[in-house]
Structure formats: C-alpha cells, structure tokens
Image: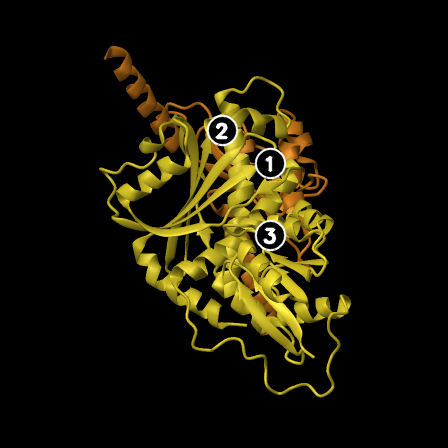
Chain colours: A yellow, B orange
Amino acid sequence: MSTKVLICDDSKIARKQLAKALPNDWKVEIEFAENGQDALEQIAANGFDVLFLDLNMPVKDGYETLEALQGVASAPVVIVVSGDVQPKAIERVKAMGAAAFHKKPATAEDIRTLLLELELFSPNAQASETPNEVVTAAESFTLQETLQEVSNIAMGRAASVLAEMLNVFIKLPVPRVSILEVGELQMALEYSVKEDSCSAVSQGFVGSGIAFEALLIFNDSSFPDMATLLGMTDAISREHETELLMDVSSVLVGPFMDAVGKQLNIDFSHGHPTLLGQHVRIADLINVKKASWKRTLAVEIVYEVENYQINCDLMLLFTEDSVPTLEHLLSFLAEDE
Amino acid sequence: MSMQSDGLADFHWMFDLLHHIDVGLVVLDRQYKIQLWNSFMENHSGVSSSIAKQQSLFTVFSDLEQSWLQQKLDNVFGLKTPIYISWEQRPHLFKFKCYRPLTSIADYMYQNIAIRPISGPNGAINQVCLVVYDVTDVATNKMAFEAIQQGGTTKA
C-alpha cells in the first residue's frame, strides 16, 4: 500500500526539488498543490497521509492552512518546509499542529532522516529501482521562477537575523520578480511605499558578471517603533534615524546577499551602504530623466514587523546586462539536486 | 626548504600589504582586545602597534562611546553579519586629523566604518575586523553641495 503525499508550495521549483528529495524506496503517490486553498480542497476530496507545506504563499498561506486543518479528523501529518527560519515561525507552526519543520532547501538526506524520525517511512530492503516518477527531466523554469525561489530562501534567512536583533516576528511576503522599465520602477515604488515621505539606503554588489543594487526603503512612520525596539530613549534626531537605517539595512541586506551568494556560488564584492535620501518623496529617489539605464530586473520584498508599525521595502535591482549571466547560473540551480 | 621559505616570503608580503594599505584595519577579539593594528591606525592615532596590541580598544581610545560601539561589536559577533557605520551618523569615530590639514576644509577625518565578523578554521566567530575608510573628500563635497542647495532655496 502506498502513502499518499501532497506537496504544497507556490514555487514550481520548490515542488520539484521536494518531490525529488523523497526517498526512492518509499512507495508514494504524489500530488501537488500551488497554495493552501488548493491543498485544502485536494485534502477534502481525496484525503492524504502526509502534507509537505510551505509557509509564504499567495491566496492562503501555510499558517492559514494549518489553522483550517485543526479539528479535521482525517488531516494528514504536516511537515512544514519553509525558507522562513525565524525561531518564532518554527514555534508557531508546531503549536498549530505541524509534526515537524525543515528549512528550505531540504536535501534527500534531510528528508529521509526526518521521515524516519517521524516513523512515516521504513527503509525497504527490496528498494524499487524505479524512482518515483513524478518529474520529467526536461522540465524547465523561467528566470522569474528560479529567482523568486532564490529570493524566498534568502528573505527567510535575512528576516531571521533581523528578528533576532529586534526580538520580534517578521511577516514575510511572496517576493515579486519583474522586469521593469525605468518609469515602471518608479510606479512600482510609489505603489509599495504608500507614504509621502521615505528614507532609503542603497548598497551595490558585483560578482561573476552580475551587478545589482540592494535598495532598502523605509516609510518614515517606521522610525518611532524602530527606535523603541533598538532601545533608543531620546528624541529621534536625524543622526539617530541614519543610525537606525544603517543598522537595519546592515542586518537585512548582509544575510540576504550571503544567502543569495551561497545559492549562486558567488562571493559578491560590495560597496559601503550609502544613504540615498532622508525624508524625501519616493519619486525623488530615482531620477527618471537622468537615468542612463532603460530596464531593470527587480526583486521586491516587503518586510513588516508584527505588532509594530514598521514597514520596509527591499528592492534588488539588477542591471540589464546581468540578466543573461544570471539566467545561466539559475538554470544550473534548477537542474541540480 | 625552498617551500618553507616561499611560505614565509608569501606571509611577509601579505603582512606588508595589510600594514601599508591605505585603510585602517583593527582586529579585535571577544574581549575587544586589539589583535591587529595596521600602519594606517598607528600613524593616524600616534599609538604604535606594540602598545596597542593586547590592550582593550576602549583603553587605548578612552573617548570612544563604549556602550554604543560595544553594542555594535556584540551584534556582529552574535548575528555573524557585517554592520556598517556611515560618516553621516558618526563622522569621526576615531578622532584623526584630516590627511590634508592645510588645503582641506575639514579639521578631522570623516570615516565610513565596516565591522566584519572573521570566521576561524572551524567556522566560529572569535574575532571581528574594523575597517576604517577615509571619506573626507566625499563628506566635504556633499556638505558643500547641500549648503549651496539650502542657500538657493532660501534666496528663492
């Protein structure tokens, strides 16, 4: 009798990687779901033994899915596999009924150990020589899909470091990847940063033919809560604000780039973070008229701190000439494992 | 024998490079004791490496705001990620005279600082490195530019 496994992740790559990481000698029937809603519907219709669940997904995220599964009599055993490695995230999913948590990406070895621990699987002496036929080798992924998954993992690592420094929980979104014309970038920024006044820090990165800027934009209304969290008691002066900007950008951008670099196998060189502007309009951050570039590949992540009014927007802006190299490197990433 | 002397020669030129590169390099252990103090730091501070070494950074520079800097250093040790300090938040962390005392308009050197974790062979972080960049020209230019802009708006 085979085990019925459902893999729920919004990323096609993550679904494929996880399916490949399942033990070859485990008799399973695998189905896939693209978000929590999809998973719940499939569970209601078909019933499953094991659910591998991502946390940051559109429509219905992992937490909402776990919540909906509470009290369901025939609910599957849930194993959360997520890039969000904040200790509080792990605590929460376990409190909500998840049997285990594993950080993304999980290797075949990791999954095997985990399944053995949970006694969901016992090694089969007559291991079937035919691996689970779930993935066709020729499946290919777009640049958007791979970059989104790389960013998703990096975003979780960075949030975990910031969460540790501030002792808070960071709400993570689904990273947005898009190719933007110079004017569209400004529109995208205006859409994300809803306030009139913002402050921003930029740091440049370069390595292996890839160049990009990491732009961190804060709503100016975030400063009072940030100051409280970092233990500043005095009235916030401009120097204090610079200090908050530099500290938060250091701990968000550094680990993020470290995680991106590790995945791409590039040790990026980087400049010192530069204060782009304080209390400026978002439109003034990027000078559309003077910009010599036309298009950029943009990854956008909006970080929010739970229970505090802190909102910042991390934008990775790749130069147009980096795109072919990046595409090449990312294609290896999707092939591997 | 030749292998060994090559290794020694390599070490010698690398050390020479560290000492004479035109940025300040300070390596501290977990007790903030100075492990490396390069020529940039020696010459600008007037404190020689032989005196600085094995002393706490806060003993050598009593005017440093200890609780403030200590928190930064501890964060680098704890979070294992670099932390940056911009001249705009702390213009002169180390109060060094400007490199061009006669032709520059600044009295003191403006500095950008990077505090980086240094991982040992086993991956543990037992030391951090302070990198001190002289950004006096950038800072004075930016301040002059802003002064002109503000002057302009006042007149208009």
Q: How crowded is mark 3: few (under 14 residues within 10 Å), some or many (20 or more)?
A: many
Q: Please, what is the three-letter code of the amino acid marked with disc 1?
A: Glu
Residue A82 vertical position relative to residue A137 in the rendered view, above or below: above
Q: Please, what is the three-letter code of the amino acid marked with disc 3?
A: Gly
* Residue A233 point in image, percent of width and height: 63, 20
Q: Is residue A24 left or right of residue A118?
A: left
| Marks 2/1 same chain | yes
* Residue A76 point in image, percent of width and height: 68, 62
Q: Earlier in the sequence, mark 2 or mark 3?
A: 3
B128 and B37: which one is in front?
B128
Q: Is residue A335 left or right of residue B5?
A: left
The residue pinned by badge 1 equals A306
User: What quarter of the picture does the C terminus of chain A occupy?
Assistant: bottom right
The residue pinned by badge 2 equals A242
Q: Which of marks 2 and 1 is nearer the N terminus?
A: 2
Residue A26 vertical position relative to residue B148 in the rendered view, above or below: below
Q: Earlier in the sequence, mark 3 or mark 1?
A: 3
Res B139 → quadrant: top left
Labelled pair 2, 1 in contact (Cβ < 8 Å): no
| Marks 3/1 same chain | yes
Residue B37 vertical position relative to residue B64 in the rendered view, above or below: below
